[in-house]
Amino acid sequence: MIETIHFFHTNDLHSHFDYWPRMQYYIKEQRLAYAKQGEPSFLLDVGDHLDRSNIYTEATLGKGNVKLLNEAQYDVVTIGNNEGITLAHEDLYHLYDEANFEVVVANLKAKDKENPNWIKPYTILTTKYGTKIGVVGATAMFQVFYEELNWKISEPRNAIINVVKEIKNQVDIILCLSHLGISEDEALAKECQEIDVILGSHTHHLFLEGKMVDQVLLTGCGKFGAYTGHLKIQYDQQQRKVIKKQETVIENAQLPETDYEEKYLESLAIKGKELLNQPVFRTSKIYNKEWFHHSNLSKLFARCLLDFTGADCAMFNAGIFLDGLNKGIVTKYDIHRILPHPINVCVIELSGREILEILLLSENEEWPLLELKGLGFRGRIFGKLLTYDFSLNDQNKLLIQGQIADLDRQYRLATLDMFTFGYFFPSFKEAKKRYYFPLFLRDILSILGEKHL
């Protein structure tokens, strides 16, 4: 007997729910049709379903996303870095308490206590004909971030290979939910031929028909819910082996719009806004934002940042502010609206000479208009790189806090974690630094804003 098994899969939704109603309606209808034909189906997500730049996700700290996954009847998911490192320890620990699906992540453990019940290195799905499908998952290794948040993260490829060795004699098919990125997927495929399909994510790659690497099929469905993957596997019951693997990708924008779609999306936004409609402080004037020079809002935020970290100086890009603050009561919703980014603060230890170099680099004329994507940034353009408490005087001498700096002395620069990944300032990657978890930029403004108005 040849058994045909269907796997619908999503990845990197990042709380973009625009196509969620129609894609889930489509998947449900397809699964019902296949069930009538006697063909089993499963629904999987490969991480970064949530993103705290969305007000519904922010207001529910991701539990609203779990509710959506439950309603859609997902079978197995893994976590991405947005689940893993943008939530406080306790919020991630309890994120999946109400989940009706399995969560597989082979390379994550709680640091100082028992693992939450949802963490499993793998699960085994069984079709009505008895075919056993092992599903293993792993997430990207942001080690410093996880350690600071009281989690232990291990090298994902080795973790996956060890699980595959453990289960390969117990199952007929092995799937890997990989929130590792395309390069890691390709390396894993070459190292572990026992895996039948690697369902990919994290790097937002799109394979319309999958990609074969040494007999392992790789998939990827882009980002933001633009596509849904449909993996079809044919399994020969007599020969006990997979005889065909086929991937197709559905463009969700081309699916018929559901009758309730607009109201559904509006209801999520309303719910999020209601939950975040909590007063934080009151302003007596307007705090404007500007993307190409300093503003009242940037000056306020700089004072908060320097106060919070105790650093000698600060630097951030003006594009982080999506809007200004109006006069009157400022709510959590208002602050989230202007600072939606899942970005943390970092303090870097640099010599005066290194800070002088950074100051010169910050004058890059191409950066202000850069349409930045990723690194936690959820804005539109990068904007001017703003510096506070360090500058050049008329003799081109470096001033820190108004005094001529000692170029050999160590100073502390408060900045954004996205600058430490090496893209803008390569020297930051190896410098001594401290990340401030789990607070985001908006949390710092919320905590200290009133003090510095």
Image: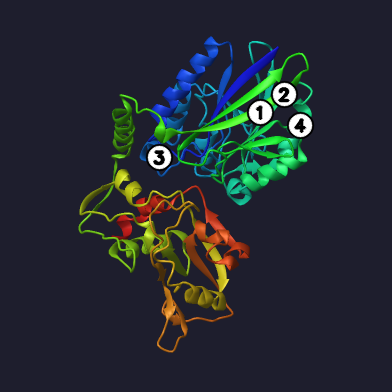
**Colour pattern of the rendering:** rainbow
Given the image, on which type of amino acid does mark 2 rest?
Val
Element type at mark 2 = strand
User: Which residue is disc 2 drawn over?
Assistant: 242
Viewport quadrant of the N terminus? top right
Which tag, 3 or 2, sits closer to the chain's start?
3
Horizontal side of residue 30 vs 274, given as left or right: right
Please tell me which residue is depicted at 66% across the width and 28% down the height of the picture.
Answer: 245
Compared with residue 171, is residue 13 higher up or lower down, i.e. above or below?
below
Query: What's the CA distance linking mark 2 and mark 4?
Result: 11 Å
The reply to whether dot 1 and dot 2 touch (C-beta < 8 Å) is: yes
Element type at mark 4 = loop
Given the image, on which type of amino acid does mark 1 rest?
Lys
User: Which residue is disc 4 drawn over?
Assistant: 194
User: Which residue is disc 1 drawn over?
Assistant: 245
Compared with residue 171, is residue 274 higher up or lower down, i.e. above or below?
below
The reply to whether dot 3 and dot 2 touch (C-beta < 8 Å) is: no
Which tag, 3 or 1, sits closer to the chain's start?
3
Front-most of residues 138 and 256: 256
Q: Is residue 57 visible?
A: yes
Q: Position of residue 297 (x, y in %)?
A: 31, 61
Q: Residues within 10 Å of mark 3 (few under 14, many from 20)?
A: many
Horizontal side of residue 172 vs 264, given as left or right: right
Element type at mark 3 = helix
